[in-house]
Every structure is written in structure tokens, then in C-alpha cells.
Amino acid sequence: MGTCYLAYSPVCCFVEVFRLWTLIPETELSLRRISTLKLPKDASLADCTASRSRVFGLTAEIHASRDYPMTHAWAAAFHKAGFDGIHYYLRHDPGQRCTGVALFGPAGLSDYPSPPAALIGEAILREAEARFGLRVTSDLDLSL
């Protein structure tokens, strides 16, 4: 089984993609585009942000664990129960305001229509700096 990870807002997607940086090199930014994916059907999602999910043994660890065998087991259990994916808090937002979707499906390329891609705009960059302290910098600034 494969998984496609999505965020509900552009800035939250940005934070997840650039998780390794506080200062983001312009060259890295120039390699990326942002898209809005429209699912071809309504997806049935297990809501891992709901407090009542605790009755199934779920804890907040599901959102940020590096224990991939554990998270893969949860994904397999959700998939077996008939869910198309999960709704969860994104790992790289310590304030846990960013949420996303992990969609289950066959591993490899999907047959979803390719959405139009756009450059990452100034509004996303300003919000990423204001909320998360992430800044884009020229590659020259990084070599000093």
C-alpha cells in the first residue's frame, strides 16, 4: 500500500515539505511548485484528531512518531476497516493547528489527474515566516 500526504492549507504543506530547514535556500524553493488536488471521489477518512479515537487505542503519538512499523500498522488497520485515509495533525507544526490527509492507495504513481502547479507565492512565504520563522535566503547568504 502507498500513501499520498496532503495538507489542508498551502502554508502547512510548505512547512512539511521544508521540514529540514529554517533558512530555505532559493535554489530549493525554485525546484518546488504547489498544487491543489481535487479527489475524484469523496474519501472516507479516519479522524485521528478526534478525542474519541482514544477508545481505539490511538494516542497523539500517531501524529509525530518516527516508529514507522507502528504507524504502518495503524494505516493497514484503518485501510482494512474500509477507510481511504486518515485526517491527522501535521508533524512539523508544534502548535498542532495544521492538519492534513494521508490517502491510501497502490504504491507508485497514481491515476489522479495532474493538477495545475504554481510557483510558491509571496503570501505563503510571508505566512511561513510569521507563523513558523521560516525564511527563504539566497544561496550566497548560506555560504557566509
Image: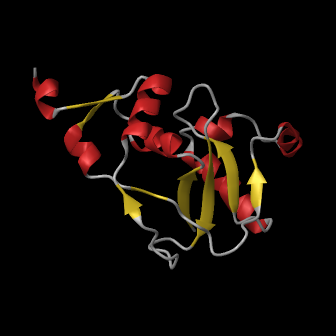
Q: Is residue 19 visible?
A: no
Where is 132 relative to 122, above or below? above
Foreground residue, 36 or 95?
36
* Quarter placement of the C terminus: top left
Q: How many marks?
A: 0
Q: Is residue 60 visible?
A: yes
Q: Position of residue 108 (x, y in %)?
A: 45, 72
Residue 85 falls in which quadrant of the image?
Answer: bottom right
Foreground residue, 112 or 80?
112
**In-image side of 91 versus 62 (left or right):** left
Where is 41 relative to 55, above or below? below
Q: Position of residue 96 (x, y in %)?
A: 64, 31
Q: Position of residue 126 (x, y in %)?
A: 41, 31
By what rule are the colours in the image chosen? secondary structure
**In-image side of 9 versus 76 (left or right):** left
Q: At 67% from the left edge and 45% from the top edge, which residue is drawn?
A: 88
Q: At 26% from the left edge and 52% from the top edge, which residue is drawn?
A: 31
**In-image side of 60 versus 33 (left or right):** right
Foreground residue, 31 or 71?
31
Foreground residue, 106 or 26?
26
Q: At 32% from the left edge and 52% from the top edge, which residue is drawn?
A: 32
Q: Position of residue 43 (x, y in %)?
A: 72, 66
Q: At 67% from the left edge and 35% from the top edge, which residue is drawn?
A: 61
* Quarter placement of the N terminus: bottom right
Residue sitting at the far bottom: 111
**In-image side of 1 versus 48 (left or right):** left
